[in-house]
Image (cartoon, grey):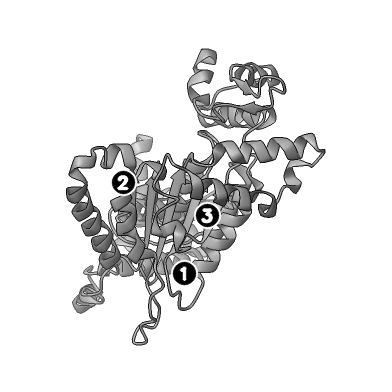
Amino acid sequence: MPPSSRRAPGFSLLLLPLLLLLPGAPGVRAERRWEGADEAGSAWGWLGLQRLRERLSVAGALSRRYWALVGCQVWPEDCEEDGEAAAGRLGQTLIQLGRRSLDTLTTWYCSFQDCCNGGDCRISNDFSGLDSDLSVRLHGQHLARELVLRTVRGYLEMPQPHKALALSFHGWSGTGKNFVARMVAENLYRDGLKSDCVKMFIATLHFPHAQYVDEYKERLTDQIQGTEQRCHQSLFIFDEAEKLHPELLELLGPHLERQAPEGHLSESPRTIFLFLSNLGGNVINEVVLNLLKAGQAREEITMGHLEPHLQAEITKSIESGLGRSRLVQENLIDFFVPFLPLEYRHVRLCARDAFQSQELLYTEENLDEVAKMMTYVPREEQLFSSQGCKSISQRISYFLP
């Protein structure tokens, strides 16, 4: 008999107990199908899938003798002198096959159905993952790494926050501001930036024309209110924040103000605003350069060294309305997060990550070649990459086979 035909009965025998465990199968009470059917995010199918996983674990604990009997019935030629050992291997194979099949089924099911044990399935709040991403994937930004993790985690673990958390990221282009915002979204929400609890706005893309500011205000208000109504925890990201129209900045003020606690709620809603801006990048670089020239180690630079200079630069800026807005004047932004200029060694690390992400082989010489393609400033010191790590991925295209 061909191998394919003699394996078919075994596969059918494997499927039979699994099918018997599914809701609505023979021997399963029909009314169980509707358990939890009216609860958002907890469809009966997922409950049935959980019960199936539990029962499969029980099935895996069946005696090897049981599998020996099944195996000897289906494949008699496999039952020789060492039938017990062969049956044990057969049983383990069937169990592993069943588990792999169930894992595949679970992945497929959860691709379109919320799968969680409770709460809002869209929210993950993986602080360990955020810590790992900031520590491993972000280079040269010890201040941003520590401040973002501490403030985001502290805010989301607060029992009754009285205002939205507002963080403003500042630094040259390519230093990691967008990168960190994406990490926050990816670790707080199952679908990252695609989550319907996350909204990202780019000033020059979403609000490009000053004459349409009234329309933009109406649209932005609807987006914020709609997202907060849908989601107990919301994230709003404003890129190129220094280019936002002053009236849009004023519109955001009430959303960042301190709110009276709502006593009837067991847990207050939470909203995080991230503002990304190149504003203040020059003063950050100047302070860092002076500290390095004075012998200060980069990793020993603190917020105390940078914060006063950064806030003063933002406040007096005539290029942007951000410093004159309520957000700054009334201290509605909780922290101004400085992103330091990146050095040659950091660019090499970015190049390494880019090679690895594209599964390309590389050498130390390749990393140096990519890093040397960047422009470094000031002219005398050649210390900081003028583009940070921006366009690194494009530059490694020269090494494609």
**Residue 45 appears in the rendering:** no
Furthest-bottom residue in this view: 264
Percent of width and height locating residue 392 = 53, 25
Q: What residue does disc 2 label?
A: 245
Relative image position of residue 321 (x, y in whole percent): 39, 47
Sequence-wise, which precedes: disc 2 or disc 3? Answer: 3
Front position in the image: 226 or 40: 226
User: Up-down: is 57 above or below 281?
Assistant: below
Query: Mark number for residue 92?
Result: 3
How far apart are the alpha carbons under marks 3 and 1?
A: 13 Å
| Residue nearest the viewer, comparing 205 with 48 | 205
Find numbered disc 3 in the image and state the secondary structure of the residue it sits on: helix
Residue positioned 46% across, 57% down in the render: 328
Q: Which badge, 1 or 2, comes first in the chain's sequence?
A: 1
Which amino acid is tagged 3?
A: Gln
- Name the residue beneath numbered marker 1: 58
Query: Is residue 214 toward the left or the right of residue 166 in the image?
Result: left
- Residue type at tag 1: Val
Q: Estimate how packed mark 3 is, as few (under 14), some (14 to 19) or many (20 or more) residues with alpha carbons within 10 Å.
A: some
Residue at screen point 36% across, 56% down:
106
Q: Nearer the viewer, mark 3 or mark 1?
A: 1
Give the residue displayed 50% in from the left and 67% down from the top.
155
Q: Residues at badges 2 and 3 in contact (C-beta under 8 Å)? A: no
Determine which of the numbered discs, if any, sits on residue 159 in the image: none
Taking the spot 38% from the left edge, 75% from the top edge, the residue there is 259
Q: Secondary structure at mark 2?
A: loop
State the count of labels.
3
* 3D distance between C-alphas at marks 2 and 3: 65 Å
10 Å crowding of disc 2: few (<14), some (14-19), many (20+): many
Q: Where in the figure is residue 307, as x and y percent of width and height?
A: 62, 52
- The x, y position of residue 201, in whole percent, is 33, 46
Which of the 4 image quarters holds residue 265? bottom left
